[in-house]
Amino acid sequence: MAPTILVTGGAGYIGSHTVLQLLLRDFRVVVVDNLYNSSETSVQRVKELATQSGRNLSFHKLDLRDGPALEKLFLSTRFDAVIHFAGLKAVGESVQKPLLYFDNNINGTISLLKVMANHGCKKLVFSSSATVYGWPEKVPCTEESPLVATSPYGRTKLVIEEMCRDQYCADPEWKIILLRYFNPVGAHPSGYIGEDPHGIPNNLMPFVQQVAVGRRSALTVYGTDYSTNDGTGVRDYIHVVDLADGHIAALHKLDESSIGCREYNLGTGKGTSVLEMVKAFEKASGKKIPLVMSGRRPGDAEMVYAAIEKAARELKWKPKYGIEEMCRDQWNWASKNPYGYGSPRNNH
Ligand code: NAD
Ligand code: UFG
């Protein structure tokens, strides 16, 4: 029988792309999501893209903090492993509403781990983030670089990583992989699924995409005086389909004996500045992106990119796409779905 994977937050941006890759590789997938930051349409579209394998996907609208509902799900289905994406991710909002983030991200994870433990499901892949490296003293960031929280959001990632390490120490039968994502961008090449943030986008590429389709007038460039080639911030952008494939590699790793609790960076190992990214998007879309040069955004690091040798060596995973493909696929999604999964009236 094909392994059955529980995917929390599977209606969201990274989750939906990962669910599709899982289905295409013949896994059975159960998605739970409270749809706080997503729409069930993404699940429906993944089902369609997966064609025949779409029948191996089921969806439950459920909040992870609802222990009894999770318990009921685990009673009805035996899961081979869990991929845990569900969480809130807006850095700025987390500074305004720290308790919302601690409650949702940390309590949601505790609730999930408790039910997994009750049912002897001890294989977990967790969505951590490059945010755990803060403003790194040295780049590239390796998995051994110092960890620091620079926002309540980042603190939730650090706390959950520590919880996972503690859980493994308490019960060495657990196998846990903590994936530290760098900057996921782009969309599935079909243009049928992609990122659809509610409200004003915080992140660079969703904002650029909304300028390109005429929903916003200009991109504000936060910081032009960094010690980088052109003065703008440098990040490690990774195609969301490469990132999704990294989860399949991690699931295979969980089949090895005694892996313990391990961390892996998922990035490309290459840094790209804001202006370089805008230029690549303009080329891919044929659209001019008007810019407003502005001061630095509080809390932003100058330059962040990943060392990816550990993932390449141990997960046998390497990214396939560069920024050209990331921008091509981002534009394909944006031009086909200028209002994401919604209608103009639902998006501001
Ligand atoms: P997303 O918001 O698109 O997806 C997260 C999903 O989780 C959403 O569908 C949301 O409705 C759901 N969710 C949130 N809280 C829930 C709860 N309590 N119960 C059930 N469902 C819940 O975000 P994404 O970009 O796909 O990110 C997925 C994960 O990856 C998150 O944990 C995020 O912190 C992490 N991450 C994202 C990035 C990024 O830049 N996108 C970078 C690093 C790490
Ligand atoms: N930027 C702009 N204008 C914008 C948005 C961003 O100039 O409107 C710049 C930022 O200053 C930064 C770069 O574009 O130099 C990337 O910014 P993002 O907000 O897209 O990404 P960050 O690296 O700041 O943070 C993101 C997520 C974090 C996550 C981190 C690493 O928001 O949650 O990637 O994965 F931790």
Image (cartoon, rainbow, N blue to C red):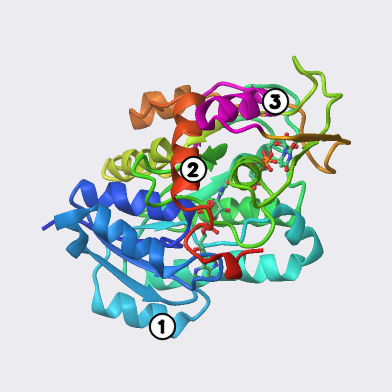
- In the rendered image, which residue does mark 3 sit on? 275
Residue 273 falls in which quadrant of the image?
top right
Nearer mark to the viewer, of 3 and 2: 3
Q: Determine the residue positioned at 40% across, 61% down.
A: 42
Q: Determine the residue positioned at 33% across, 54% down.
A: 19
- In the rendered image, which residue does mark 1 sit on? 69
Q: CA distance from mark 2 to mark 1?
A: 27 Å
Q: Tell how many labels.
A: 3
Which range of residues does the magenta coloring cover?
262-288
- In the rendered image, which residue does mark 2 sit on? 179
Label 3 CB sits under 8 Å from any ligand 2 atom: no
Asked whether 67 or 54 is in front, the reply is 54
In the picture provided, is 113 more to the left or to the right than 25? right
Pinpoint residue 149: horizontal percent, then vertical percent: 73, 47
Task: Tell me the element at label 2.
Answer: strand
Amino acid carrying mark 2 in the image = Leu
Residue 267 is a magenta residue: yes
Taking the image as drawn, is residue 267 in sight? no
